[in-house]
Image (cartoon, rainbow, N blue to C red):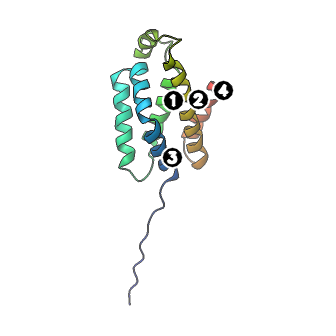
Amino acid sequence: MTYYQTLTKLPCPNLEHVRGFLRDHGTALAEAAHRLGGPAASARVFLLCEAVRHTRRLTRAQSSQLVDFHRLLTLEHVGDPDRIESGLFAQIDPASGFVTECCLLSDKLGALLKLIAENDPTSDIRCKASHIISQVA
């Protein structure tokens, strides 16, 4: 008699966290990315949302995109006049509610990056996330 054992992989906890974040904040992230990084940045958010819906594990590329979005929200490249972020940031009213929304979204994304790094100690996102979080803190 032959027994077949079905091997089911446990769901990737990081992927579940990312899916939850994008479900709850994906639209806000896309809007912020559009205002801070232009249409290409918001398109990358939508592509990431679609990609994590259809994958079994969070990839390095997807983790790296999350880090890039955090850098965008924390205005890392605003001081570089050769980048689109510089011109787009100049158009934003510092007293607008958008600034507060970006700060809150940045904090939430930073917490997600920290959680990803803690759940996967072999991931290189730990270095990227801790470097970014230490800059923000």
Residue receiving disc 3: 17
Tell me how far mark 3 sits from mark 4, CA to CA. Answer: 22 Å
Q: Among all residues in the image, which is located at the extreme front?
A: 97
The amino acid sitting under disc 3 is His
Q: Is residue 6 above or below residue 25?
A: below
Q: Is residue 40 above or below residue 114?
A: above
Proximity of marks 1 and 2: CB atoms separated by less than 8 Å: yes
Residue mark closest to the camera, 3 vs 4:
3
The amino acid sitting under disc 1 is His
Query: Residue 46: x and y, percent?
Result: 35, 35
Instruction: Assign a secondary structure to mark 4.
Output: loop
Residue receiving disc 1: 70
Tell me how far mark 1 sits from mark 4, CA to CA. Answer: 13 Å
Task: Name the N-terminal-most of marks 3 and 4.
Answer: 3
Residue receiving disc 2: 132
Residue mark closest to the camera, 1 vs 2:
1
Proximity of marks 1 and 3: CB atoms separated by less than 8 Å: no
Instruction: Assign a secondary structure to mark 2.
Output: helix
